[in-house]
Amino acid sequence: MSALLDRPGRRPGGRLQRGLVLITSLLLLVVVTILAIGMFRSFGLQEQIAGNVRDKQRALNVAEAAEQYAESYLSSGNAASAAACTALTNYVTPQVCTLTLQAQGVNPASLPWTISGAPVGVTYAPAGPVALPVNASGQQTAGGSNTYSQTPVFYIGFLSTGTSNGMITNIYQIDAVAYGGSANTTAVVEATYQTQTATKNLGETQ
């Protein structure tokens, strides 16, 4: 024992201390690694949430645009007659349906809208600067523009009509659905729209 104590720099507890330092360092490394993995997973989850919110907002904006187009069509006096809607039509030649979706047993929130197995409504696919690029894969186009998985659709259903003080009032229900980059991202909007037309009896001349 005396020979060990006489050696320069030799301490009986040195090996034990070096072992404790190694264990402590490894524990700290494990803790730091776990924290780093948790942070990366949190960042990835937040990015996914932000992307989903953005895609949902895109779908909502397009659904509202389709609804506003339907309102513009009605306000232009193009809803003089209604038809039994049994198929899809193009937005260039929209149609007003004699019945609303609900009156035909269709839940607007249940997609796609079908009557007797056939899709119904008006496809909203404007051209030009407001064109909506549709790509079933939901990927971006070559130019970097975000695409939509499906073409938006709106449905105009006739609700009621009435006359008061020389004014003819017609009320319609408009439903519109749009899709984001994925078919799983959808937005459905519904609005009640009223148009009024003035009438005047000129009477008989004497």
Image (cartoon, helix red, strand yellow):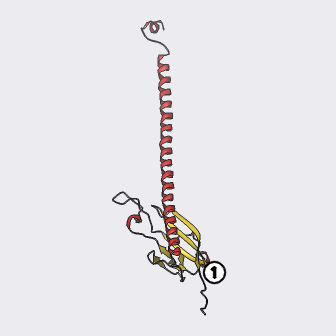
Q: Position of residue 2 (x, y in %)?
A: 47, 6
Q: Quadrant of residue 162?
A: bottom right
Q: Which residue is mark 1?
A: 166
User: Does residue 89 sit above or below 44 in this rendering?
Assistant: below
Residue 11's place in the image compared with 166, above or below, is above
The answer to whether 109 appears left or right of 149 in the picture is right
Q: Which of 24 and 46 lies nearest the eye of the viewer?
A: 46
Q: Which residue is rendered at x = 47% and y = 36% of the image?
A: 33
Image quadrant holding the C terminus, namely bottom right
Residue type, mark 1 in image: Gly
Return the residue nearer the eye: 116 or 10: 116
Left or right side of 101 for 144: left
The residue at the point 50 percent across, 48 percent down is 46
Horizontal arrangement in the rendering, residue 168 relative to residue 76 (left or right): right
Q: Residue at x 44, y 11 (%)?
A: 10
Where residue 122 sits: x, y (%)? 48, 75
Residue 71 shows in this picture: yes
Q: Secondary structure at mark 1?
A: loop
Closer to the camera in the image, 112 or 56: 56
Task: Tell me the residue at 63%/81% (across/down).
Answer: 166
Label 1 packing within 10 angstroms: few (<14), some (14-19), many (20+): few
